[in-house]
Amino acid sequence: MGKPIKKNPLNPATPRRGLRFAPTLFVLLLIPFLSWSQWNWVNPLPGPDWYMAMDFTSSGPGFALGVQGNLIKTNDAGFTWTEVVPKPIPEGYYTDMLFADQNTGLITGVGGVILRSGDGGVSWSSISSGTGHDLRSLSMPDPLHGYITGNQGTILKTDDGGISWDPVPTITTSNFTDNCFTDSLTGYIAAGKYLFRTTNGCSSWDTVFRSESSWSFDKLFALNDSTIFVTTGQGFLFRTTDVGKSWTRLNTGPNNHFGGLNDGLYRVA
């Protein structure tokens, strides 16, 4: 019997958010099957992987990234998908992906990996992160400014479209699970039972939400400058409409586990 499909050690059961600019919400559901040595995967294509990140450019194609580095692309709003070949990304464990525009793409992974594409995902080059910690979340509120957060309180910042990244003084040594920025200065970071907010490009942070129970924060999504959603691993969904001053728990029904946040919401029951 062949080896099982590899899973992301960070959180193998949780798909990453995607479709930041897509008008329609898609969910890639892929079950990792065990393959027998005498069989080859033929259909459907692309082959099996655990797709952790999806993103659509504002006026062009969409991409989905598997943890093993499989990159698939759609040019018809997600109705059909094809593999980007030859495979441009080395096999590894990847955690997040976004496209700042139709050409510029970024990928993060475990061990401080950052990859950047300047040709729409055809080729990717390695960018120095200056850290060996796992990087878990990308956010670019505009084509030049971006932020990466990861384990051990890692925060990285770019002002040149992801060509170079600089460390930002951290506020905790906890693992950051997600971040979202509404502009180049204002953003939110989730870390365990705490949700932090900055309004000055990470120079300082305020605690805007704290878990009073056993649940911890997981995924973040900014609908606009003032309306922010955050999920927990236990299936809770919270919303603020006043830039984090107050939070309301929304009714999501029983036994829900959220997989991600984007232009809409989806759940995996």
Image (cartoon, grey):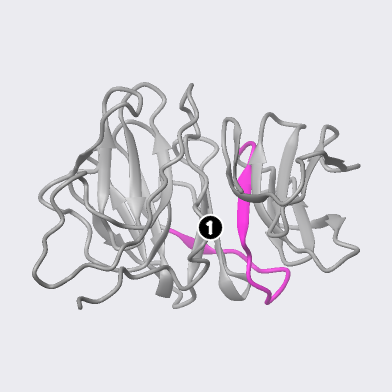
Image side of residue 130 versus residue 149, left or right = left
Seen at 77% across and 32% down, the residue is 226
Q: Is any atom of residue 99 visible in this view? A: no
The segment highlighted magenta reads 165-183
Residue 45 rendering spot, x and y as whole percentages: 20, 44
Seen at 48% across and 21% down, the residue is 23
Residue 87 appears in which quarter of the rendering? bottom left
Seen at 76% across and 40% down, the residue is 252
Residue 77 rendering spot, x and y as whole percentages: 35, 24
Q: Main secondary structure of the magenta part?
A: loop
So how many labels did they put on this image? 1
User: In the rendered structure, which amino acid carries the disc numbered 1?
Assistant: Thr
Residue picked out by circle 1: 14
Image side of residue 22 versus residue 78, left or right = right
Image quarter in which the N terminus is found: bottom left
Q: Is any atom of residue 248 visible in this view? A: yes
Image side of residue 40 versus residue 189, left or right = left
* Callout 1 secondary element: loop
The answer to whether residue 197 is above or below residue 128 is: above
* Residue 172 is one of the magenta-drawn residues: yes
Seen at 31% across and 63% down, the residue is 33
Image side of residue 166 versus residue 163, left or right = right
Residue 245 rendering spot, x and y as whole percentages: 90, 42
* Residue 105 is one of the magenta-drawn residues: no
The answer to whether residue 116 is above or below residue 102 is: below
